[in-house]
Image (spheres, grey):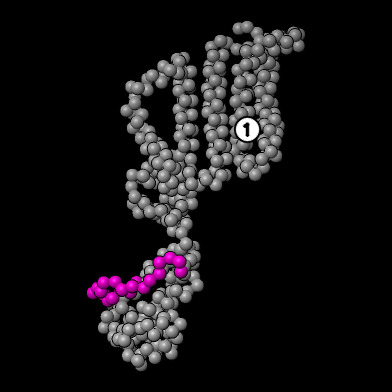
Amino acid sequence: MTQSHLQKLLKPLFADTERAELLSTISATGIGLMAIILLYFFLSSLMLPALQSLMMRIAPQRTSALKPLLIKLNRRLAGFICCVAFLASFQTVVQIPELYLDIIHSCVKILLIVYGGFIVSSMVSIGGALYNQFEFSREVPIQGLIQLVKLITFIICAILIFALLLERSPTYIISGFGAIAAVTMLVFKDTILGFVASIQIAANRLVTYGDWIQVDSYGADGEVIDLGLNTVKVRNWDNTITTLPTYTLVSGSFKNWRGMQESGGRRIKRSLNIDMNSIRIADDELQQSIEETLQLCEYINTTSLPDKVTNLGLFRRYAEGYLKQHDRINKDLTLMVRELQPLNHGLPIEFYCFSADKRWISYEHIQAEIMDHLLAVLPIFELRPYQSVSGQMNGSS
């Protein structure tokens, strides 16, 4: 074994001792390791954070949200630089047999490759985070593309590590992939399908973050919180999380409520089943009673009524006028009250309109208020809702 330069410098200090060789070796090794540790802490705690602070001063709005990613990148850069410094100075600091020297060199080179992969991964994550700060990123998410770049990066790192261990050129490892192409396709089938699906989703703007989607086959009904290369995460309205394969959104069908959220209102489509035995011609006495109770002329033009209007016809006109004057209904969208085909459980009267407030809770309250009111005024028109047990039961059984 040849003595290292640092060991030669330290050996005269231990010339008077019996084990000068051993003490100089231990001292040189300790100084070398301490220097690497100090270099790591200097880089991770002083120099790189100073550069990070400078970036934040230049663009505080962009980089303030990236602080956790920048800290992670700083640590990985510090580790990478320490690996390079170790490889460059190891032989000049430590005296070690050639066999162990090769093993240590190989281990540090592998660590250097791993750090390099993590650095690329961090830079891709920072680029993705910067992209997500722009408005158009919600329309064209690139989370799947980011994950694909990371996957390719680590595949390349794995190839370099195998080439280093086998002492072969990386091209030799790559050339062997042809023999296992079928296995590779099988292993990465979901990744390949997910990548193709991610491109189609981004190009056609099928889904983006925050969209309300409904995929009945997977029990998903809620807001998209993550669009990955392999999976899409949906937070359901009961706060559970449903995970489904990304390619499902392309290969199957799903419902996206984005159009409703971007429109002027949310559809209300409810119906009442009227007992057909309660429908009759509205005589003058009934019309006068309805007018006195509900002030019918405020909702409909009584002069335009036909000669023999039914109580159901009056109710339909009243319901439509009530919806038109409702302050929480969008009057610019379709609004109507119509009869559907009579069935064995009564005559359905459908109320079709759009709530101006699209928030779920408010929307449900508006629906309930409308149905409560219309059910309450039915007896005034001498109409009865159809139920399994029709009619009224007086007294107790």
Residue 388, position as x, y percentages in the image:
28, 77
Instruction: Answer left or right for 48 relative to 297.
Output: right
Q: Is residue 369 above or below residue 262?
A: below
Query: Which residue is at the front of the view, 245 or 259?
Result: 259
- Quarter of the image where one finds residue 61: top right
Answer yes or no: is residue 343 visible: yes
Q: Residue at the location (56% across, 21% down)?
A: 108
Q: Is residue 123 above or below residue 166?
A: below
Query: Which residue is at the front of the view, 162 or 142?
Result: 142
Q: Could you tell me which secondary element the residue under label 1 belongs to?
A: helix
Residue 144, position as x, y percentages in the image:
45, 39
Asked if the stretch drawn in magenta spans residue 346, the answer is yes
Q: Which residue is mark 1?
A: 74
Query: Which residue is at the front of the view, 75 or 189?
Result: 189
Q: Residue at the location (55% across, 26% down)?
A: 116
Q: Quadrant where the N terminus lies? A: top right
The span picked out in magenta is 331-350
Q: Residue at the location (34% across, 50% down)?
A: 253
Q: Is residue 397 above or below residue 181?
A: below
- Quarter of the image where one finds residue 276: bottom left
Q: Of the residues shown, which amino acid type is indicated by label 1? A: Asn
Disc 1 packing (10 Å; few <14; some 14–19; many ≥20): many
Query: Which residue is at the front of the view, 103 or 73?
Result: 73
Task: Name the main secondary structure of what is drawn in magenta.
Answer: loop
Q: Residue at the location (46% across, 32% down)?
A: 151
Residue 342, position as x, y percentages in the image:
25, 74
Q: Residue furthest top?
A: 2
Number of marks in picture: 1
Q: Residue furthest left?
A: 344
Asked if the stretch drawn in magenta spans residue 96, the answer is no
